[in-house]
Amino acid sequence: MGCSGCTSARGCSTVSGSLPGGCKNNGSCGTGGCNKLSVFDWLSNMELPSGQAPFDIVEVRFKNSRKEFYRNTTNDQINVGDVLAVEAGSGHDIGVVSLSGELVRLQMKKRNVKENSEEVKKIYRKAKPSDIDKWQEAQKLEQATMYSARTMAVKLNLQMKISDVEYQGDRTKAIFYYTAEDRVDFRELIKVLANEFKVRVEMKQIGARQEAGRLGSIGSCGRELCCSTWLTDFRSVSTSAARYQQLSLNPLKLAGQCGKLKCCLNYELDSYMDALRDIPDVNHVKLETQKGRAFHQKTDIFRHIMFFSYTDEPDTFIGLSVARVKEIMAMNAEGTKPEDLTLKVVPLKLVEKKHDYENVVGQDSLTRFDRSKKKKKKKRNGPPNANKQEAAPNATPDKPNPNPNQIRPAQNKPNSNRPAHNKPNQAKPNADGSKPNANANPNPNRNRPNRNRPRPNNSGQPKPPQETKE
């Protein structure tokens, strides 16, 4: 349905141009109204070829699901939702355009109505405000007229049920819809109704499904009834449709609002019938095995699995494929019996399949970035004094250096790599009291070629000599 909540008698169409109350699509729904059996015009956005005239027949909808075709003889532009005054048996009727354009041609073919048929009547004009007011007054009388007609039928002891009343647009005729199991003589009732309401009376018998479609309701599925929204072809439904679908034959669950079997039982029946072609009929056949006789319990149609049980173990269900069931039936026909229903299968050894692709995720550790990086020792090309080693700051005379092999930068001593002071050096006298030679080196150890000889550290262990660059 196009939109919901519209309570206007004319659907989503209005004469004054204002939006109808309750319509949530602002009067522009694609189905032409919030009515039963609404049709979506999927050809509305397509333009006709140049030189082709639009189709001159439109579909007009009346109360509930009654629709008829009318020809546009006035050559006026008629759109979906327009209120028209159309030809009737006597006088004129008021209806709403439910479909126009090329889609009407397809609907006529569907209902086997020819374009030149006498069923196609003509359109008088677009309804005037006075026609619409008279039509709305007639609609208000329909409910009270139905209750009065039911009372009169009970007084006349007629076995019939009047379910709906529809007035003609000009209030000169009324159609009474009724249901009855047997033939009813309602000639006396017609006289009473004509004298009471001063209108021409027409009695029309309908079935239980049509009655439910006209009244409308909510089904057990939680949606509106199919017969009141889109279904127009009422086919007979039998209990065999429920048997093929393996449904429980419970009339309370299979019956609809009309009291008949639900129409939706025929929707999936063709799919079940196609699936049952490959499944053997074993309802009256029992499988013979060496372990015992087995009978059929149920069938999963779409999975092609049949369940059997031994006569000694009726509570144990054994699922068999259709191919296995046919195999056992063929063996029984030859006079042989299998050892068991199930087919013994030799277990296969599982061989681990090696992947022929590289495991990108597993080849590296997820914690590879959490490892601490080791600092590389850099070789320094500085002066010879830079490679000297000293004791760690934490070393004490009583406590040796915790890491004796650790190399620390040497400190600048007074006599290493410093410029000469202006103060002259004072040579110390020799042991015998003579003056030292001025040209002699006061510190002979400073000019030795190998200055990186091993020296004992605070721990008393000699250090290996270090390489020197020439």
Image (cartoon, rainbow, N blue to C red):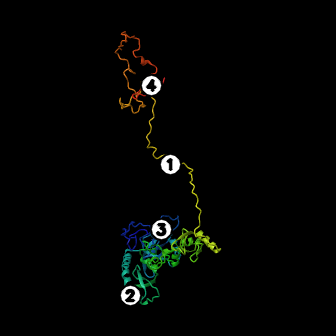
**Residue in view at x 53 percent, y 49 percent:** 359
The numbered mark, 3 or 2, whose residue comes first in the sequence reads 3
In the picture shown, does residue 370 fall above or below 159?
above
Q: Earlier in the sequence, mark 4 or mark 3?
A: 3
Query: Viewer-proximal residue, 467 or 434?
Result: 434
Q: Quadrant of residue 155?
A: bottom left
Q: Which circle's residue, 2 or 1, is located before the other in the chain?
A: 2
Comes first in the chain, label 4 or label 2: 2
Residue with the mark numbered 3:
41
Q: Badge 3: how crowded within 10 Å, few (<14), some, or many (20+)?
A: some
Disc 1 and disc 3 in contact, CB within 8 angstroms = no
Residue 152 at x, y percent in the picture: 38, 87
Cβ–Cβ under 8 Å for marks 4 and 2: no
Q: Which residue is mark 1?
A: 362
User: Split into 4 quadrants, where in the image is the N terminus?
Assistant: bottom left
Q: CA distance from mark 3 to mark 2?
A: 44 Å
Between 125 and 167, the residue placed more toward the observer is 167
Residue labelled with disc 2: 152
Mark pair 4, 2: CA separation: 135 Å
User: Which amino acid does the dot numbered 1 rest on?
Assistant: Gly
Q: Residues within 10 Å of mark 1 (few under 14, many from 20)?
A: few
Pick whichever of labels 1 and 3 is earlier in the sequence: 3
Which numbered disc, 1 or 3, marks the residue closer to the eye? 1
The amino acid pointed to by label 2 is Met
Q: What SS does tag 2 mark?
A: helix
At label 3, the amino acid type is Asp
Q: Which mark lies nearer to you, 4 or 3? A: 4
Query: Sequence order check: which comes first, mark 1 or mark 4?
Result: 1
| Residue that mark 4 sits on | 454
* Numbered label tally: 4
